[in-house]
Image (tube, rainbow, N blue to C red):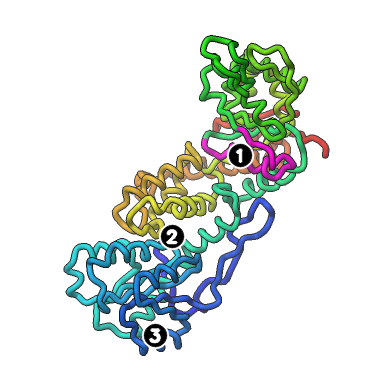
Amino acid sequence: MGPLIMAADDSDVPSGRPLLTSLDGGALTRVQPAERSLIYLSRQPRDELAEFLNERGWRVQPARSVADAARLTRGDEAAAGLIDIASGFTNRDLGSLEGCLRRANIGWVAVTPSSQLDDLGMRRLIRNYCFDYLKTPCSHEAINFLLGHAFGMITLCDFDITQSVAASGDDEMVGTCDAMQQLFRTIRKLGNTDASVFIAGESGTGKELTALAIHERSDRRKAPFVPINCGAIPHHLLQSELFGYERGAFTGANQRKIGRVESAQGGTLFLDEIGDLPLESQASLLRFLQEGKIERLGGRDSIAVDVRIISATHIDLQAAMSEGRFRADLFHRLCVVRVDEPPLRTRGKDIEILAHHVLQKFRGDSARKIRGFTASAIEAMYNYGWPGNVREMINRVRRAIVMAEGRLLSAEDLDLDGFTSQLPITLAQAREDAERKAIEGALLRHRHRLNEAATDLGVSRVTLYRLMGSHGLRANDDKSLDEEPEG
């Protein structure tokens, strides 16, 4: 995807179309301003220029000082900005000007005399924060033309995605692909039940976000959501962390401590990386799930606790149960309903949408006004396998924002320069990648029901099973995972 050029006429702006769907089911559409807004920052605004721009469809808002401009740029509306440096702004104004020019929803064009470009600070300000600049003298038509380009870039790219994500209110849970739409529908259904949920997925796919979304759409949303990473707590401390302890229960227990289970009273307990839970703690957790009561370490009283359990892991619990590392009876208590998080590499266009969302969220980490991604960066992100999924994308884009030298993030900035078209790929590799993605997509759509996935792909169950083996995809034949509870 190369640089986008917008003409000055509003008719050239693409018509609105749905970009994202929120968890609440509403379509989020492209924001299209009724008219083009222009902030004209000049110590001596030229009436003839303002009148000319008004006739060309701009809603001109003059600002005679940086304070006026700051007031006009407080909103989130997409706008173009014209800064007339020739009207008397000097390098002493740079600090205050920078705050206005950093606004992500405004595309600035500078008009400056050649003499002021000799100043290093002024050159840096224009290079980092302005879409383009013109040297004086220049024609009104040239100014109007560049303002149209700047406004088009803001409306079509960054501002469009910013508005859509902000409207969704779902943080990083952003997506348009079939697997994500199915996930959103499942989350809405699970909000209406109190059944235990097991979330499966690779590391970094956003399992905790899914758990939180389920909690916030349930009747327990006003009570606590308490997460605990079972793999991050030493085994000898996990019992006390889960169930708490009484004063004097062991050396150093100087006062009573409420455990995570009890602190989630009335709400949701999220057990992340449940596969790392030691067998001793598995037995205690199973007893709690059966009886609905806990005992603090060193205590004698049984305490009734009403919580909903959502658990998650990135490891294969079927293999863990076969090897005796995880109790099957506990698994079936936890996995009343199974939710599969799709890996990023199977989510198609979502890769680019997520990248823009992360850029918008963290662009303030850089002093430069980062505007987007180069064509090579977009290509590399599609070609890369994303073993760390969404978490890895966030880390790569944040690092690129800090380290980039230009206003567009490149494949090199993302440390993905080896995944552009300059890297040759054979037809056999292309076929293999396409086949694997098709199989993964079908399995996710049909929640690992092999018969349905095979029918979708147009092959027999035996052929699908063989292809899964050749691609290293594990089959899940546990019928209990394919069934949802009634209600």
Q: Nearer the viewer, mark 3 or mark 2?
A: 3
| Residue 311 location, quadrant | top right
Residue occupying the point 36% across, 65% down: 101
Where does the image place residue 341, in percent across and percent down from the top left? 61, 39
Extreme residue in the right direction: 487
The residue lying toward the viewer, choosing from 469 and 267, is 267
Q: Amino acid at mark 1?
A: Glu
Relative horizontal placement of residue 137, taking residue 242 as reference (left or right): left
Magenta highlight range: 204-226
For label 3, the crowd category at 10 Å Cα-Cα, with few meaning under 14, some 14 to 19 and many 20 or more, is some
Give x and y (percent) for residue 106: 42, 67
Foreground residue among 200 and 455: 200
Residue 220 falls inside the magenta stretch: yes
| Image quadrant in which the N terminus is located | bottom left
Mark 3 — residue?
A: 50
Between disc 2 and disc 1, whose residue precedes?
2
Residue identifier under label 2:
1
Provide the residue designation for mark 1. Answer: 341
Amino acid beneath label 3: Ala
In magenta segment, residue 186: no
Q: How many marks?
A: 3
Helix, strand or loop at label 3? It is helix
